[in-house]
Image: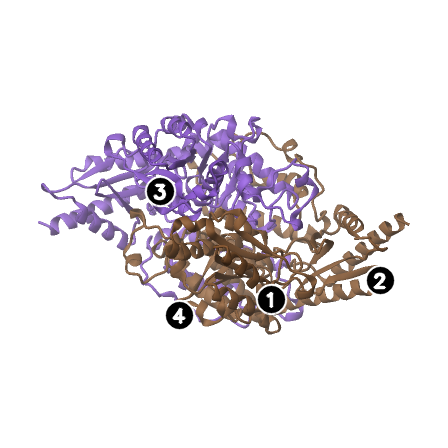
Chain colours: A purple, B brown
Amino acid sequence: MGSLPLNTFNPLDPAEFSDESHAVIDFIADYYRTVENYPVRSQVKPGYLSKHLPNQAPLFSEPIDTILEDIRHDILPGLTHWQSPNFYAYFQANASTAGFLGEMLCSGLNVVGFNWISSPAATELENIVMDWMAKLLKLPPCFLFSGGQGGGGVLHGSTCEAVVCTLVAARDRTLRKIGHDAISKLVVYASDQTHSTVQKAARIVGIPPTNFRIIPTSAASGYSLTAHSLRAAIKADVAKGFVPVYVCATVGTTAVGAVDPIRDLGKVSNEFGAWYHVDSAYAGSATICPEFKHYFDGVELADSISMNPHKWFLTNMDCCCLWVKKPSELVDSLSTNPEYLRNKASEGNEVVDYKDWQISLSRRFRAIKLWVIIRRYGVINLVEHIRSDVAMAKQFEMMVSMDKRFEVVVPRKFSLVCFRLKPRFDGDDASSINQRLLEMVNSSGRAFMTHAKVDGMFVLRFAIGTTLTEMRHVEMTWKLIQAKAEDILLEDV
Amino acid sequence: MGSLPLNTFNPLDPAEFSDESHAVIDFIADYYRTVENYPVRSQVKPGYLSKHLPNQAPLFSEPIDTILEDIRHDILPGLTHWQSPNFYAYFQANASTAGFLGEMLCSGLNVVGFNWISSPAATELENIVMDWMAKLLKLPPCFLFSGGQGGGGVLHGSTCEAVVCTLVAARDRTLRKIGHDAISKLVVYASDQTHSTVQKAARIVGIPPTNFRIIPTSAASGYSLTAHSLRAAIKADVAKGFVPVYVCATVGTTAVGAVDPIRDLGKVSNEFGAWYHVDSAYAGSATICPEFKHYFDGVELADSISMNPHKWFLTNMDCCCLWVKKPSELVDSLSTNPEYLRNKASEGNEVVDYKDWQISLSRRFRAIKLWVIIRRYGVINLVEHIRSDVAMAKQFEMMVSMDKRFEVVVPRKFSLVCFRLKPRFDGDDASSINQRLLEMVNSSGRAFMTHAKVDGMFVLRFAIGTTLTEMRHVEMTWKLIQAKAEDILLEDV
């Protein structure tokens, strides 16, 4: 280690690679052993890091031990610890040993499989593992390579990429019939619970922001989008000369974990010729369990479906599965064929060139990660992993409902519990006490939750699924929440 | 290892994490020791892998040793080995120990820094390291956070993402003035040497495919886009009522490594109010050396500039640096602000929320990778690394030009040499012999090159920069090329 003399500079020397990698492994293992001790949500102030680091790159090499020491002292305190067992914010990004091993293999082999020939195994393993995943989720054959109906899957980095690509395909499918100038007539439909990524994607692909319909949901339907309201919105637009191009339904919404009626919305979308996408970023993982399978009923009506293993499938960042019924519609919009990428295999049409199924040309070998995870754990453990998180959420939900000061706001479906302190008097919307409760819990450093608003209510979200979370953490956090609530309620007397 | 009993399933157990990670490190170190022995371009036939793997996920867990053994037997033969010292195809994706360590830290900490509060250090380290990189590339202060002019940088996964985001900002900046319906009037300008990603991005953001101008270049300008031809193209469009929205210039084109005149094209772009982007995906890394700095002359006229450390800066996939003069223009187009992400820091406007500078919400902690690379090697070694690749390319170019059967087609600027077998008689375009030569070299498994076409010529591209490549590999490959050429020329007698 230390300064590397110029004449022997070999940044991929196997011995040095081993030594330094082992040092980093030990560092990370130690991090997992102690992650519970850090404030979950970082407590630093904006701009803290520039006080610790020089404002320009070092001229000379520095040893890895020095760098790791700086990470410990300067970086770790500034992290919000997504791997802390007391992280209940957003949705979890649940790391695992196998996910990490898969990332190491991806990064170590460092192949770039943009087309088949640039690394055949990268493409073919992705074909195979996407079919494995589709079978685990019990998707119909129309989404599988082996389904014999022309469908197939691809790994993206995020749902937003998946939505941009399917939106572009949907847009072009429609514009081919009515001409490009009609782009200003295209309308995209979502609910007020749909992830903001869909609105952003619609804007990215050139659909006017005013043509994004946010259809209201309510407690009556459990915050799911009803076929009735979708149909009414589409009909109103069609009457005005607009063209419905894309409908997004969700299994497991971000705010409250609601599930849209997939079959009903699919029928309406199909009737009006709009592309039908099902986003199951968070809850898609749960459908590997038979008891959650029914949420996908009617998914054969969809043009595309996506879910993120990097949320709840023990997959380190990043990984989003996208299946499409007609990949040729993606390729029609996203294909490029510059001379420097031409090759016999692609021209023979015998192979998949994934560059034409995604935004970017370059791509990481994510398939090996997902494949290692599935093999290392096996379906039985993966199912158990989902069930144990759901069981903890159920337990938490019960504890909340047993405390008269609190209420569960939306019935729990998966491992997300939405609750709040009840209003204390007529006309109290309870927003301010719940907002204070959230801030007190988060600034204690002992747990991190986030919030949502539904029907004007300020709701606390408790998302269980971080890999290291055990029931004792959930129990301790509930006690913490109760204690902070007690303080707030006493103050207000 | 082996089957994991359900009741103790802990997929992030630190001891197991250590053991299994060390096993994978040893596997990868061994791969680097032996990578030279594999056929560089995989020699498998389409569909080979499905014969080796089961068509559904295993029910039970499998030990990591079994998985690694399967990778050795089933996956490695199907890889095209981008880390082989005899890989000269496309542009290199040069891995390094520090790049790998950085990826491990990114993946192990597994934080998701979409906004500041979700992991302050992830955002702040990215701010700092983007300024470090900007200074290394000698970019003007207008692109730095610390430049005091409102500029700054962000890490994307690929150039295509960077181009999509800047195109969306450019599109909306123009449409805000002339109305969304005018999207069909917007025109994007590039040369016939510009990377295909720009054309794809223009299509993604909704600009009509017929409004993408591919301006021809020629040998006379070394295949760079001239200001004269750009101006003529823009003027012709403006006369017809079109609106120039985006111009992409390149430092180091993909096909032949040409450099566009950055200042001259910038003046034309600015004159017509088009967004001016400079793509230096490959050659940007070289500008850390003073001798290449002048290629960026005039870059202060650009609205944005991008380069890919994952090509030539010892950075494992993926990593693309994008700097913009007015990040607010990205934010105007890409910002979303759903309730569940609201927080005090963001509302105080004191912090950067990178979700609004990119396509996706989620993002990996890539900054730690780039930071580890720069610190571990230091500027001196990084400069030396670029220079040694350039020196090898110079040597290769010299060997080619000393063999009368060959010619260097385009003068070399960086580490890419474009050459071919000369035509043998009047009217011979030499395409078929060069095509055969390429195929013979690649199917030998001993080296992998790709090709390009310029002015109708079939040109062999020899891109030097894979980390393990030493002069002995270049020399051996040149001998191989000469021997295959000899065979071809003898056959044809």
The residue singled out by tag 4 in the image is B149
Instruction: For marks 2 and 4, give the CA distance.
Output: 54 Å
Earlier in the chain: of badge 1 and badge 2, it is 1
Instruction: Name the chain under label 4.
Output: B
Instruction: Name the chain under label 2.
Output: B
Instruction: Name the chain under label 3.
Output: A
For label 3, the SS is strand
Within 10 angstroms of label 1, few (less than 14), some, or many (20 or more) residues? many
Q: Is residue A411 left or right of residue B94?
A: left
**Whether marks 1 and 4 lie on the same chain:** yes
Q: Residue furthest right?
A: B493
Q: Label 4 amino acid?
A: Gln
Q: Return the residue nearer the eye: B277 or B108.
A: B277
Q: Nearer the viewer, mark 3 or mark 2?
A: 3
Within 10 angstroms of label 4, few (less than 14), some, or many (20 or more) residues? few
Q: What label sits on residue B404 in the rendered view?
A: 2
Instruction: Name the chain under label 1.
Output: B
Q: Nearer the viewer, mark 3 or mark 1?
A: 3
Instruction: For marks 3 and 1, give the CA distance.
Output: 44 Å
The residue singled out by tag 1 in the image is B286
- In this picture, is A411 found above or below B149? above
The residue singled out by tag 3 in the image is A212
Instruction: For marks 4 and 3, give the CA distance.
Output: 35 Å
Q: Label 1 amino acid?
A: Ala
Q: Quadrant of residue A383?
A: top left
Earlier in the chain: of badge 2 and badge 4, it is 4
- In this picture, is B111 found above or below B46? below
For label 4, the SS is loop
